[in-house]
Amino acid sequence: MPLEIVRNDITKMPVDVIVNAANPSLKMGGGVCGAIFRAAGAEQLQAECDKIGRCEVGQAVITGGYNLPAKYIIHTVGPIWQGGQAGEAELLQSCYRNSLALAQEKGCNSIAFPLISSGIYGYLKDQAFKVAVDAISEFLLTHELTVYLVIYERQSVFHGSKLLTAIGEYINENYAEEKLRDKTRSSLEPSDLEQFDGLLEYVPLSGYLVSDPKVQKMRSLEELVSNLEESFSEMLLRLIAEKGMSEVETYKRANLDRKLFSKIRNNKYYKPSKATAIALAIALRLNLNETLDLLSRAGYTLSPSSKFDLIIKYFLTNGIYNIYEINEALYAFGQELLGC
């Protein structure tokens, strides 16, 4: 089910189907298109494409994969960038939607996309990426499919993003703050450290939290004691019920595979990875306090000395719960992705 952003050669992806950014005449071209034709076997692939004849912008057709690891190739024709006022976004969305529908129709379980139209067709890479993620994530809310978005150059895709600039500043500020804390700690006597740490760090089940004023929340002693023995799985299921969400909605919004969610649900003592635990917190739209409580049940916390953790904290404290947007930021900063 999940969407994963990867840096790879699309012709080597071990999936059921790969997508070719084709031209309307379905002829072997340059760039990704040429690489796919060469890897599949140009002569035999071109012969099948010639039988199909043509594919219009926004539409998709399918052929065999021939010498590729993939069983099929879906050929879709992206729009040429004309400044953004010629319906380019709608046509590009159609490329992804029609390709995904065709893969589903053929019974495929996995598919790999290039960033369509971002090469010689001139579509701005950051905007092409956003259209791709929006179209794919919308499809995955109602379908089960593993989708890979294959990116060749990380920097060129995310260059100039205001969100990533803000996150970078947040990371730099908090790294500096953590260094100051370390320096201050080193000047204290050992007997002072416990009290000092209590003012700087969130302590799970402490009854209060001072790590961020936006999410300060007093918690009653009765609440703490009554939920003290909950495992991660038990707390997760309780929170899903309290939020009025279904399990399917939860694992889809967490960008998780159904089988993995079943393991968590059916094993009271299952310990998920940290990325999985955070993905579920994001899906449930938990605030920072609640997220730290859930993470503590699996033995995790968020550290101010970790870029990954600081990025997660940035999104939580700003109330941004779109897991694909969060994964975009994590990928741009070279961090592990959530869910997938």
Image (cartoon, rainbow, N blue to C red):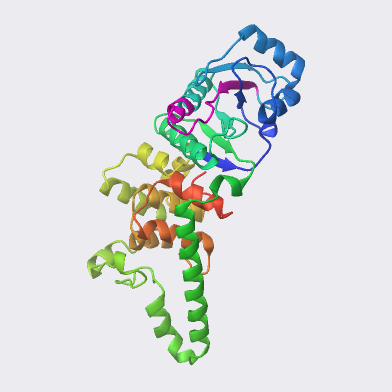
Q: Is residue 72 magenta?
A: yes
Does residue 289 appear in the picture of this structure? yes
Q: Nearer the viewer, residue 99 or 15?
A: 99
Q: Which residues are magenta?
A: 71-92
- x, y (%) of residue 101? 48, 21
Query: Residue at image x 69%, y 23%?
Result: 29
Query: Residue at image x 52%, y 81%?
Result: 182
Question: From the viewer's perspective, is residue 279 above or below residue 218?
Answer: above
User: How many numbered callouts?
Assistant: 0
Q: Nearer the viewer, residue 114 or 112?
A: 114
Which quarter of the figure has residue 61?
top right
Q: Is residue 332 magenta?
A: no
Question: From the viewer's perspective, is residue 236 above or below residue 313?
Answer: above
Does residue 231 appear in the picture of this structure? no
- x, y (%) of residue 244? 26, 43
Judged left or right of residue 220, residue 176 is right
Question: From the viewer's perspective, is residue 5 above or below residue 30?
Answer: below
Instruction: List the single residue furthest toward the top.
Output: 51
Query: Residue at image x 66%, y 33%?
Result: 10
Query: Residue at image x 59%, y 54%?
Result: 334
Q: Nearer the viewer, residue 14 or 320?
A: 320
- x, y (%) of residue 318? 35, 57
- x, y (%) of residue 305? 52, 69
